[in-house]
Image (tube, coloured by chain):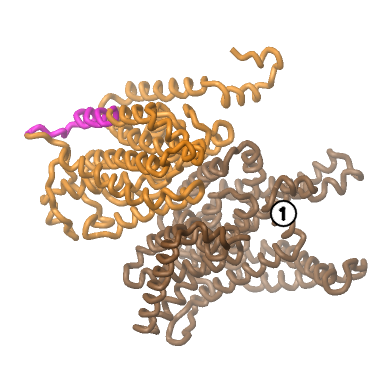
Amino acid sequence: MTDARSYISNRGNVLAIVLVTLVVAYIGWKITESPDQALQFAFNGMSVGAVYALVALGFTIVYSTVWFFDMYYGAAAALGAYGVFYLRSSETLGGLYEVNNPVVNGVFSLIVVGVAFWALHTALYYRLRTRFSDRALRIGFGVSALIAGAYVDVVLTRPEELHVTLIPAVLAVTATVVFLAGRYAYANLISSREPMVFNVILVVIGVALGAFSAFLIADSPGSKLYLSWAVSCFLAGTVSLALYRGLYVFMRERARSPLVMLVATLGILLAFSALIVIVFEPTPRPLPEPFGGSAHEIAGANIKTLNLFTIGVAVAGFLGLLWLLKKTTFGRTVRAIGDDEEVAKVVGINTTVIIATVFFIGAVFAALGGLLSGHDTAIQPRMGLLLLLKGWIASVVGGIGNLQGAILGGFLLGMLEQFGIWDLAGEWRDVVSFVVLILFLSFWPAGILPRK
Amino acid sequence: MNGNATTASPSLFERGMLMLREKGDLELYANVFVIGWAVIFTLWQGVGFAVTLGTVFCIWAILSVSLNLVVGYTGLLSVGHIGFFGIGAYGMAILTSDTSYELLRTESIPQFGLPFFAALPICVLAAGVAAVVVGVVFNRFRDDIYVLVSFGFAIIAFNVFLSWRALTRGAYGIPDVQRPQIGSWVADGEIEFLALCVVFLLIVVGISWFLVSSSFGRVLKAIREDEQVAQVFGYQTTYYKLAIWVISAMMAGLAGGLLGSFTTFVDPNSFILLESMLLVSIVILGGLASIRGSLLGALAFVLLEEGMRFITYLPSEFIGQVRQVVLGVMLVLLMLFRPQGLAGRYKL
């Protein structure tokens, strides 16, 4: 606390208090002036803030692990939104604009092949190498990875049958989730060593539930939009993982400062945003309305179901990440790497695998933020950079490297932005958020909730 | 030449890496390649085209040299330089704006009707004043946060250009910006304008070279290497950083004024954040802390765009994007193998 205080001279303190009072007074005056409109602005702020919170959460988990700034993150947000557009383009523009492109499908499939091979190799090599020869293992992993890539290619080339092509994936994911959740519950509630029978029962239940959900999905073509969310989040995460494993690992060995990484990832962002323009043209595009475009009226103000959903996703994502970081072994290793990577290596943590997973999770959050904001407004190639900057600002405002700070900062930034443009026009919102950033950096450089 | 090659006989890859990292050879090759390309290009496309290209090059060169003073010599990675460029261009457009377009105007803006050579110093001063305000705020930040707030400056500047319609006509842009003229002589021809730009480029390069080789430049380098040590030796680093920031911004304002007069049309889309990121990549590509490198980077940047126009199977609307991809990939490769850039003296 004294450390944080020493940043600020006494005069700075007084200024900060005056500033906060002014802002609170302004908002209070606005609320008393027209409470209905204030509520509407608050809802808008919450909706925008939820997107910022999602982006900031993913940013925080990556940044607080590797301590360099990954600009690809902005491209991940754009990829998430454009992935949905790619898979649902016929629906959005009434079949006038089909973007299905064999080159794009092939590139993504190749990336999936690489990532799948690496994942299989890291997961299974040391368990199986006593039983099989190296060559047999490599061929086995290679063939499985190729099958995975071919599957992704099939899914991407047939966006109209998404609810059919994704049946195996839904089955597998549901079964795995049920299995892991059951084991986690058993280990925490009953005993740390579960009997074999329990595992068998879990597998049976998992497969049954998986088959049931796959059946449900195959029966409802309306679920294609929600399935496309999953696919595009998965792809954005996979690209992030591939970038980390294929590039950042080597770059981090050579880099003298975090700025080198920042500039290199800036290059990646430049390349990705240009590729998005090449594939999708620079015009802003709409995404289809999820949830039938329905809206709710609460106390005289309107809020779309989508926005409520976004807020829910942000809160759920925050709780999920918190649980993951604080309660699981994975989370403990992530925190250990964030504290000191060298020591984590020394005590036997496979840092590459853990950080690669973190990059995957972070990019999934970015993609979620991107696609949900894309549904709310529209998508355009430069949205990625703007979302990235907003997420960055939100996490600085909340306290950099701190999950609670990220979600608080995201919602606060959204609210301040909306109340800030009340008397100005809407196009000044970016200016408002950067002014907020500069004020925070000047008066509370450590953010609202500093990382301990 | 390469003692290692004979004794330890490293692989071709290792020798390549050695050359990339240690030798100045690459710098020479890059110089020869880019300048040779420019000469071939001129011979191929004729002088008229080369004159236009040369003017664009001069403007980008002024920009990248000025940014190199901040990024390369002082170590402040600013991504917001396009804001000062825009202030210069808009200053030129507003100050010299002509009433002949009055009928076309949907939103009228103040009319000053100043001549080019009176407006240019005002543009430079306006960029300088803006830089003082911005610099005082930015001086306390470092590293990542500096990058973030400089992004912020670029976005704020863009939004002002776009949304302050009473001054900038917003998205309509300001047409009919004046060409330079003295008395009855008007620099309407491309050659005259190129000559003017070359003169300004030489002035900027001269000032930059003088700055970085003086004791002032040595203090800047000391700040870049370790700011606290510079403070221990009694230098008020804040003032040095502010001074170089303002000088650099004034140069960018000059480049902006030239651009406004060159294209005779100014609109916000020339000053988006992306352009600023491209500018940073030019500076890093050419070489940090090297004025020659910045010139090289700007030349390569201009040639890259124009050169790709003659790849016939590339649709013309993708040229800018392909150039952006090339720059991005080069940035990644440079950061991997040669973090000082092609001709650089300072590793990021």
Percent across and percent down for residue A286 are 45, 64
- B313 sits to left or right of A187: left
Q: Which residue extends farthest left?
A: B184
Q: Which residue is mark 1?
A: A336
Extent of the magenta region: B184-202
- Is residue A98 among what the camera can see? no
Percent across and percent down for residue B83 are 34, 48
**Residue B200 included in the magenta stretch of the image:** yes
Name the quadrant of the C terminus of chain A: bottom right
- Is residue B173 among what the camera can see? yes
Displayed quadrant of residue B57: top left
When the figure is inspected, residue A97 is found, relative to residue A142, above or below; the finding is below
Residue closer to the observer: A55 or B78: B78
When the figure is inspected, residue A44 is found, relative to residue A390, above or below; the finding is below
Residue closer to the observer: A281 or B143: B143
Percent across and percent down for residue A36 are 39, 84
- A171 sits to left or right of B166: right
User: Could you tell me the amino acid type at mark 1?
Assistant: Ala
Chain B, colour shown: orange
Q: Residue at x 85, y 41 (%)?
A: A136
Main SS, magenta residues: helix
Q: Residue at x 40, y 56 (%)?
A: A283
Q: Among the chains, which one is brown?
A: A
Residue closer to the observer: A260 or B282: A260
Mark 1 Cα shell of 10 Å, populated few (<14), some (14-19), many (≥20): some
